[in-house]
Amino acid sequence: MKKYIIVLFSLLALSTSCTDYLDKQPDDMKTDEMVWSSRMETEKYLANCYGGIPTGHLHQHEPWVGAADECNITWNFYQADNFNRGDWTPSSELVCDRYARFYQAIRATLTFENNVDRCGELSSELKTRYKAEVRFLRGYYYYLLLRQYGPVVLIKELLPSETDFANMQRTPYDECVEYICQMMDLAAYDLPMHYWDDQTRLGRPNKLVCLAVKAIVRNLAASPQFNGNAEYANFKNHDGTPLINTTYSEQKWKDAAAAAKAVIDMAEKYPDTRLKLYRNDENGDTEFNPYKSCVDVQLKAWNCEVIWARSEGQYDDTFQRSWMVHNTPGPHCLGGVSPTLRLVDAFLMKNGKPIDVAGSGYVEKGFAADGGDNWNPNGYDIASEEGRKGIIADIRDSKAWGHWKGDWNMFCNREPRFYAAILYNHRVIPSLSDDKNIRNEWSTGRQKDGFGRAELYLGGAARPSINYANYSKTGMLVFKRNDPQADMYNRAYPQNYACTYIRYAEILLDYIEALSNYDPTNADIRKYWDQIRKRAGVESAFVATPEIASDPALMHEYIIRERQIELCFEGDRYFTTRRLWKAHTPDKIVTDPVTGEEKDGRIYGDGGSMWGMNVDAGDVGSNDFNFEGFYKRAVFEKRVFNKEYYLFPIPQKEMDKCPGLVQNPWWSGNTAN
């Protein structure tokens, strides 16, 4: 009897494959023989093994940005809203969608690996490479499950239909980690170093990608959430097997450092990998510009810092463009992805000092009397039409950046990464043409001067009334990954983009964090930290804040802060606060000794008070850029974070089908709570 490959997949029943392209009506189904005898069909099957990789899709279906303490997403139909209100349970759809999807994809990789040798139209070299790709994918999907749900049911091979799936138990966390790392090592052995000589394969894993994922997994496993966390002492399978090792191991940090260093060594030893931190002067420009470097590293597809990404056409190609629509202020865009003041406060001053360190030069209140160092590098007379167009061209070319006269002092004299990431009130919107009439569409009243500055206060162009839905609840917007050369009025985009999953800066940060946990005097900490700061145009942390050299705890805290800045809005912060076991830090409101006003008293904590500008202050009819009440710190949201939220719950429908599973700690259904 012919065997049909059909997409009827029940999570742990694992009886069939899971590719979309084979999900046909019965009269259009392909037989098993038809698939594995044809190169075209076999490669289609392989392509669909990649189908489980998340693409972000504006973060509507994941909380990694909107439920992190760095950001708020205005709209309540985003999953982050459910998380922030504490409105989710093991039965919530948002809990279930990826759990099944990842296991389906894992099943597909096993099916492919078991059958690809049957395809006579593929060379032995391609078969070897394709097997390596699906091993990578299997390990990667298990990593995605591990970071979201914790210890998983580890299935390493296709199992017969008579297997007792219902009573399979979860695999201890450390064993899951080792299996994932094993898959990365096996895949790396049979994959090329890079695909620069065959760019049609960009987006597929190579040796560097495998080693980078291994480094990220090791970093997660070494972190306090899973390394000696006594609060997981009762997290056990039904047979009493502990799922988290509650004994701290320094060796895990050493393993994490070694894994990250392996990536760094490969980049430094083999120049043909082209892997290094992106700088504009090494990519077409004659002079180094830290601001432009930090802008372009997010926009230039397959630049030298990208370790792994997927090009447009390999994923939802509306993502990057839609991201810009949702970040650019109204009236002609949606403008509702908003940084919190906690993130804004984390950014350094231009001298490399945190804002709360003596000598930083930070000023909280008042309007700037002059522009910053780089606001008008060509000295245009901006009162003239020629000068207006000239400086707008410089802004769109990322030649002009920093604060202007009249900007609120809180936003002045900050480091280049701040301006590459944050669009604040009164800042000229880069992503518009120099057409005066178009720019005036973003301005109101006497502020129609042809510059098109962001009006984020109540009554401004971005929020014309108290009932207007598409606005920033923090009074600021995300600018990171917004193309300054785009024309957001006409929705015209000057280049193709990629969805980047891993970049080199993350690996450098992983490495120095790992070292700081067991060898804080290691010279590599300064070496690679300085590389990150140098590209950002910021003084070395060891020069700006020399006290860290003799204070390992402070050094570690500043490394995490560097990560918070460098990787903001890239989906890292959500997992960082959790793996550090800091997300449940209790709410704390303090009085600023200088201003006498209340403000956030924490640097961690994903629940409780979240702070922004006072966006509801003042009067719709009279507010303008001179209204100081807008700039008073205010709580825009009270979030809920319960300890069970550290891990997603196992979906209830899987718990019902599989009584062998134990639920994650503190969720209803976990008898060890």
Image (tube, grey):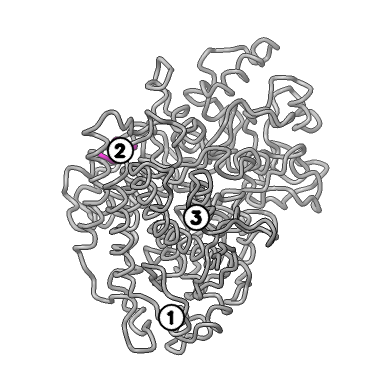
Residue 423 in percent (x, y) is at 59, 38
Residue identified by numbered label 2: 193
Residue 636 in percent (x, y) is at 64, 58
Disc 3 crowd rating (10 Å Cα; few below 14, some 14-19, many 20+) is: few
C-alpha separation, residue under disc 1 versus residue under disc 3:
62 Å
Q: Nearer the viewer, residue 140 or 580?
A: 140
Which amino acid type is shown beneath numbered disc 2? Met
Q: Nearer the viewer, residue 198 or 57?
A: 198
Q: Nearer the viewer, residue 442 or 372?
A: 442
Residue identified by numbered label 3: 592
Residue 618 in percent (x, y) is at 75, 48
Q: Quadrant of the N terminus?
A: bottom right
Q: Residue pushed farthest front?
A: 1
Residue interval drawn in magenta: 528-532
Relative side of 616 to 413, left or right: right
Q: Secondary structure at mark 1?
A: loop
Whether 414 is drawn above or below 554: the answer is above
User: Disc 2 or 3, which lies upstream in sequence?
Assistant: 2
In the picture, residue 123 is in which quadrant?
Answer: top left
